[in-house]
């Protein structure tokens, strides 16, 4: 297992046990999916901001990306350096199969529950 | 494109690289960079700010060090202490701001003074053998033998080489006075420069002193005559701004010798511009061998005191022993001088005046203050260093006291906090830590602010004090941080310890009952501290007042002649000895009412000789100056007895005019005895050589011909055509002109006149530099450094007063709060607003009055001591003390006035209701 910094010991241990998906984590995961091969810190931040309409700090995005990677929902590799970044590489994230499953599972749970809201489904 | 990164604070960059793990650093920096570029289009300030925020967020989110998430008890305690400090600071904003401002002012004043003192004390530190270099001083044989002279005769070095093997090297530097150098830029064009910092050095000069050579070989440059070493700045002046040091080598310049012939010197070395912190300051050095003729003729003399003699002692030499041993040299080597020149044996010559040689360590030369003048560079003033040093410490003390005072004062409000903490089981030690940490944090924040202020204000200070101090070299020095850290801890602990012990000693039951918050007793000590603060502030006010008074007094002092409106032309000696034609030309100018030649100008007449009255064997030291009758008229000197030189009597040129002081010194009585027994007609003799005689034809009223800092010395005025004196026709000469106020009544006229003069003189000889001065300005210049320091002193005294007032303001605010209820009850019972203001402010006024009583005798003593050093001293008037007392009281009343009036105007219903 590769050495990752203990950026948040509490979260780490907690989430490794039950691999749930938080609300913000879900948004980030969705953004990574949308962006396909171009998902890195800033693009994810912009994507989430665009759809959710709220302003997000870069650090929050990074923390979440790494947390999702620890959970095994994302994988990453370095690449795609541009002049704009002072010739530094980006860490490009992409979703793993587990990640996709998790996303789908979450979506399914919601779909199911949606169906049982009487106000929204008068015919049931 | 790493250059783009210059805009971002590099310290953030550095911190990120320390805190963030390597594997993530690259992408984070990249992201930050990208975001910055995007945001920069909407304004750079915003982009910078957001860069900072994002960077901090990342640092917190990804740091491998997690101080606030630890389980370590001590750290948790510290965290809680920080939190408490922060909350307390916020809760009492007024106190916090007063505390920080007071401390910041105190620390910045102290830091500036510290930098100044450090700068003054570390002169000549760059010589690699500096700790082994000594200068040889001797008594001031031309005047006051009890004071030291920085220069010796040439033979001293010869004696040292011969008889003192403890010296590895002995080297001499010879002052050559002002020199005229011309350089030819091309065939037709040449430039003339007047060089005043122009000396001759011996071949081993650069083996003793380590000046930085850009080109040239320090070991050989002075082996040959007619060799020259210049500083880079001088080279640029001579050969053009953009010249390279290598191109200067082997170039030649022409130098006008004292006999008017031109000699050619070759540049053999270029030095980097000299460090400002060197007591030796020169533009040009030539090899002493170039003066071999003069050295052969006069090298045996002990009285040709134009040399500074420096020795490099061998390692491990005992200086005390060496110094003792050197005392055997003058009796052995000086007799030829006294016998051949003064017709006296060494014993006779030095009777009552021991001729001692004194070794002075190189690094003490600048600041020691004795000898008071260096021929070859600047002299520091140890008095300024002492005065400023003590002010720095006092101001710091004042602000520390402020801090203590305010902390204990507001402690009443924290008594409950202490009580609760103790009840909940806090140890006294933990409380101590809490308070000391608070104070250290305050000092830390203030120190950071103070250094920012110092950095921003140093330029102003440098301009004011004529220094060249910079904070930057210190910042790169690790020792500096050590000192600052120790300073912060020390000041924090000292300032915090009293409140800490005081507060932590509260008994929980009593504080919780509320006893301390009403009748608590730190008052005596607080009042004592206020008295101490104001004593110092008032003393400073009085001292500054007297410094200013003394400065005003000396600058307005009657120098004994009309010193205004006199224009002086320099370099006249270069026109040759006979300058009558020039004089006629000057006299024909309607702008001048009088023109006169002299071989010396007040306040810089330093020549002198040994004389005696005919029929009296007492030898006395008299100053002398050569001039003509017109010059005495021009100065408008008052004759007490006799008359001026008369051009119609040819024999007058062998006669002299003396001043009153000279008559007194020669034993010819004073003004009141002149009528009975006039000095006119008496004979004055030289006490050396053939004992030439001079008849006195007149006595003038005393006038200042050196600085107004000195008493007027006895003076002999010799006619410049007297061909019997040894220096007949030699030396620097000047023309002085009294301006006609009707012809010259504005600066444009003056400008026009000067331009005209320059052209006229250039017609006579274009190679002679045009140089002029005004007599009154020259007098002003003699105490410029005192004036400068007077201004700096004003500034620091002002700081001290401001700090003391901040403390008083804080204390008044606190008392107003404490006494709200009392004042409310008084008001309910019928007291008027003015009565309450009186009751309230009288408590503080009393303290100020006590301070005045303490400060007055103290300053009287100090000012009296300081004025002892002046020949002409201002009187110590009592009204100054009155004025200072009044000033202090006014300031204090204004400071507490706001608090007292607002306390008195409070609605008693509100203040009594408050529970």
Image (cartoon, rainbow, N blue to C red):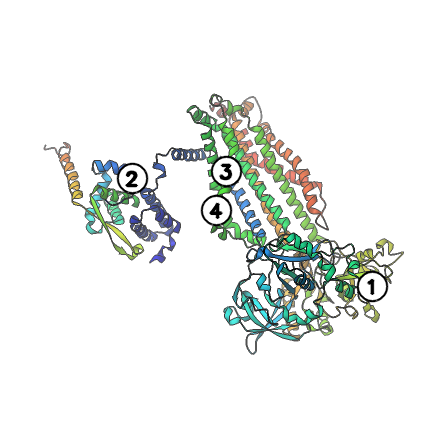
Q: Position of residue A19 (x, y in %)?
A: 20, 38
Task: Identify the element where label 1 is drawn.
Answer: strand
Q: Which residue is mark 3?
A: B492
Determine the CA span between mark 2 and mark 3. 36 Å
Chain where mark 2 sits: A
Question: Which quadrant would residue B91 be assigned to in this image?
Answer: top left
Q: Position of residue B204 (x, y in %)?
A: 60, 65
Most foreground residue, B122 or B549: B122
Find disc 4 in the rendering and name its residue.
B481
Badge 2 is on which residue? A8
Q: CA distance from mark 4 to mark 2?
A: 34 Å
In the figure, is residue A101 to the left or right of B722?
Answer: left
Say which residue label 1 marks: B685
Chain where mark 4 sits: B
Secondary structure of residue under mark 2: loop
Callout 1: chain: B
The residue sitting at 54% across, 49% down in the picture is B115
């Amino acid at each position: 297992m590769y050495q990752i910094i203990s950026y948040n010991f509490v979260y780490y241990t907690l989430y490794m046990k039950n691999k749930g998906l938080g609300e913000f984590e879900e948004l980030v995961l969705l953004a990574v999916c949308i962006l396909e091969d171009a998902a890195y810190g800033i693009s994810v931040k912009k994507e989430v901001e665009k759809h959710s309409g709220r302003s997000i700090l870069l650090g929050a995005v990074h923390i979440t990306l790494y947390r999702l990677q620890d959970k095994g929902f994302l994988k990453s590799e370095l690449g795609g350096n541009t002049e704009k970044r002072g010739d530094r590489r980006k860490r490009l994230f992409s979703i793993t199969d587990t990640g996709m499953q998790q996303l789908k599972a979450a979506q399914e749970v919601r779909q199911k529950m949606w169906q049982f809201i009487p106000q929204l489904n008068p015919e049931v | 494109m790493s250059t783009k990164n210059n805009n971002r604070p590099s310290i953030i960059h550095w911190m990120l690289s320390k805190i963030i793990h390597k594997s993530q650093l690259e992408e984070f920096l990249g992201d930050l960079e990208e975001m910055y570029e995007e945001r920069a289009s909407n304004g750079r300030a915003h982009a910078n700010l957001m860069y900072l925020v994002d960077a901090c967020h990342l640092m917190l989110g990804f740091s491998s060090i997690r101080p606030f998430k630890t389980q370590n008890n001590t750290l948790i305690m510290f965290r809680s202490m920080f939190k408490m400090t922060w909350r307390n600071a916020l809760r009492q904003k007024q106190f916090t701001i007063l505390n920080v401002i007071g401390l910041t002012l105190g620390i910045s004043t102290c830091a500036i003074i510290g930098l100044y003192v450090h700068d003054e004390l570390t002169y000549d530190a760059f010589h690699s053998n500096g700790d082994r270099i000594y200068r040889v001083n001797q008594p001031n044989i031309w005047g006051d033998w009890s004071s030291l002279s920085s220069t010796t005769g040439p033979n001293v070095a010869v004696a040292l080489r011969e008889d003192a093997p403890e010296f590895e090297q002995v080297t001499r530097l010879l002052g050559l006075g002002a020199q005229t150098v011309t350089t030819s830029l091309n065939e037709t064009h040449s430039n003339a420069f007047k060089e005043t910092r122009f000396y001759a050095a011996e071949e081993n000069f650069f083996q003793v002193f380590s000046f930085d050579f850009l080109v040239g070989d320090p070991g050989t440059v002075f082996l040959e005559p007619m060799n020259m070493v210049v500083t880079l700045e001088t080279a640029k002046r001579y050969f053009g701004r953009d010249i390279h040091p290598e191109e200067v080598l082997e170039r030649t310049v022409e130098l006008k010798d004292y006999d008017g012939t031109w000699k050619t010197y070759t540049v053999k070395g270029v030095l980097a511009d000299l460090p400002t912190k060197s007591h030796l300051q020169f533009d040009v050095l030539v090899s002493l061998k170039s003066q071999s003729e003069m050295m052969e003729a006069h090298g045996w003399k002990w009285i040709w005191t134009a040399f500074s003699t420096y020795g490099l002692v061998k390692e491990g030499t005992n200086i005390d022993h060496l110094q003792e041993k050197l005392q055997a040299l003058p009796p052995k080597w000086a007799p030829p001088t006294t016998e051949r020149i003064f017709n006296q044996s060494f014993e006779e010559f030095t009777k009552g005046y021991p001729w001692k040689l004194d070794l002075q360590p190189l690094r003490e030369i600048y600041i020691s203050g004795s000898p008071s003048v260096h021929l070859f560079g600047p002299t520091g003033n140890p008095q300024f260093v002492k005065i400023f040093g003590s002010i720095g410490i006092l101001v710091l003390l004042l602000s520390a006291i402020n801090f203590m005072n305010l902390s204990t004062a507001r402690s009443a409000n924290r008594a409950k906090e202490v009580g609760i903490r103790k009840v909940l089981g806090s140890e006294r030690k933990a409380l101590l830590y809490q308070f000391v940490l608070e104070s250290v944090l305050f000092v830390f924040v203030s120190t950071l602010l103070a250094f920012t202020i110092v950095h921003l204000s140093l330029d102003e200070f440098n301009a004011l004090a004529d220094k060249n101090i910079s904070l930057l070299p210190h910042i790169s020095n690790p020792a500096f941080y050590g000192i600052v850290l120790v300073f912060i801890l020390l000041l924090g602990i000292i300032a915090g310890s009293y409140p800490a012990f005081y507060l932590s000693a509260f008994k929980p039951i009593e504080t919780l009952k509320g006893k301390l918050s009403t009748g608590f007793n730190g008052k005596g000590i607080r009042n004592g501290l206020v008295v101490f603060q104001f004593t110092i502030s008032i003393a400073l006010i009085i001292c500054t007042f007297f410094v200013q008074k003394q400065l005003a007094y000396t600058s307005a002092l009657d120098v004994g002649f009309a010193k205004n409106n006199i224009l002086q032309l320099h370099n006249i000696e270069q026109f040759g000895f006979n300058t009558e034609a020039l004089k006629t030309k000057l006299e024909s100018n309607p702008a001048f009412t009088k023109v006169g030649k002299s071989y010396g100008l007040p306040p810089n007449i330093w020549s002198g000789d040994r004389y005696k009255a005919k029929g009296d064997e007492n030898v006395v030291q008299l100053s002398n100056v050569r001039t003509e009758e017109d010059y005495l008229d021009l100065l408008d000197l008052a004759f007490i007895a006799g008359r001026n030189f008369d051009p119609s009597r040819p024999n007058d040129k062998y006669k002299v005019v003396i001043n009153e002081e000279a008559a007194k010194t020669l034993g010819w009585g004073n003004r009141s005895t002149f009528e009975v027994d006039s000095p006119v007609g008496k004979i004055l003799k030289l006490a050396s050589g053939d004992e030439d005689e001079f008849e006195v034809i007149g006595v003038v009223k005393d006038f200042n011909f050196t600085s107004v800092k000195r008493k007027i010395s006895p003076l002999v005025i010799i006619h410049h055509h007297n061909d019997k004196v040894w220096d007949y026709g030699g030396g620097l000469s000047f023309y002085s002109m009294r301006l006609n106020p009707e012809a010259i009544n504005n600066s444009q006229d003056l400008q026009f006149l000067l331009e005209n003069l320059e052209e006229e003189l250039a017609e006579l000889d274009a190679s002679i530099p045009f140089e002029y001065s005004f007599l009154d300005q020259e007098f002003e210049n003699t105490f410029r450094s005192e004036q400068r320091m007077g201004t700096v002193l004003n500034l620091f005294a002002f700081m001290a007063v401001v700090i003391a007032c901040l403390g008083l303001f804080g204390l008044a605010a606190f008392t107003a709060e404490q006494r709200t209820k009392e004042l409310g009850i008084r008001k309910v019972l019928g007291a008027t607003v003015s009565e309450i203001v009186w009751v309230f402010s009288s408590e503080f006024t009393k303290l100020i009055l006590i301070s005045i009583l303490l400060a007055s005798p103290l300053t009287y003593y100090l000012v009296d001591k300081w004025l002892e050093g002046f020949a002409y001293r201002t009187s110590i008037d009592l009204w100054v003390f009155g004025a200072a007392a009044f000033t202090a009281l006014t300031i204090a009343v204004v400071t507490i006035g706001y608090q007292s009036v607002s306390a008195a105007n409070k609605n008693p219903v509100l203040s009594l209701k408050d529970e």
